[in-house]
Amino acid sequence: MNTAAKQLRLFEAMESEFRKVGMPEKDTSELVKEMKSATNHAAQALQVLRRAMGDTHGISKIQ
């Protein structure tokens, strides 16, 4: 999981807010689990793009 999100307890805060608006606990837990997973997959996809395209210095390897 993203270090910043972990430090900010972002997902815990979201789960708490979902419960406050009346969402059942089972659903909030499942939703937050899926959101964590989606965030992780998106971060990994961006890493692959950055690595493949040589984005470190703004020079694309792909022509």
Image: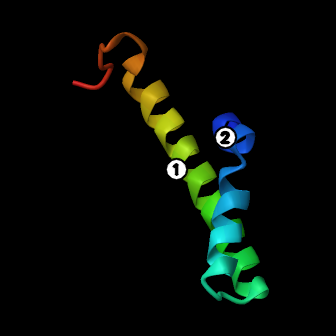
Q: In which quarter of the image is the C terminus?
A: top left
Residue located at (52% from left, 50% from top): 42
Separation of disc 1 and disc 2 at Cα?
11 Å
Q: Is mark 2 on a helix, strand or loop?
A: loop
Q: Is residue 60 left or right of residue 41?
A: left
Residue located at (65% from left, 87% from top): 23
Q: Give the number of marks.
A: 2
Choose between 51 and 20: the one closer to the eye.
20
Name the residue carrying label 1: 42
Q: In this view, does 17 lie to the left or right of 9?
A: left
Task: Classify 26 as above or below 51.
Answer: below
User: Which percent across, then down, holds residue 62?
Assistant: 29, 25
Choose between 47 and 2: the one closer to the eye.
2
Label disc, if present, on residue 24 of the rendered structure: none
Which amino acid type corresponds to the residue marked 1 in the rendered image?
Ala
User: Which percent across, then down, holds residue 58?
Assistant: 31, 14
Instruction: Locate residue 54: give its quadrant.
Output: top left
Residue located at (73% from left, 43% from top): 6
Which amino acid type corresponds to the residue marked 2 in the rendered image?
Asn
Choose between 23 and 31: the one closer to the eye.
23
Q: What element carries label 1?
A: helix
- At label 2, counting other C-alpha atoms closer than 10 Å, the crowd grade (few under 14, some 14-19, many 20 or more) is few
Name the residue carrying label 2: 2
Q: Which residue lies furthest to the front in this view?
A: 20
Q: Quadrant of the N terminus?
A: top right
User: Which percent across, then down, holds residue 37?
Assistant: 66, 60
Instruction: Locate residue 44: give its quadrant.
Output: top right
Q: In this view, does 59 lie to the left or right of 55?
A: left
Choose between 61 and 57: the one closer to the eye.
57
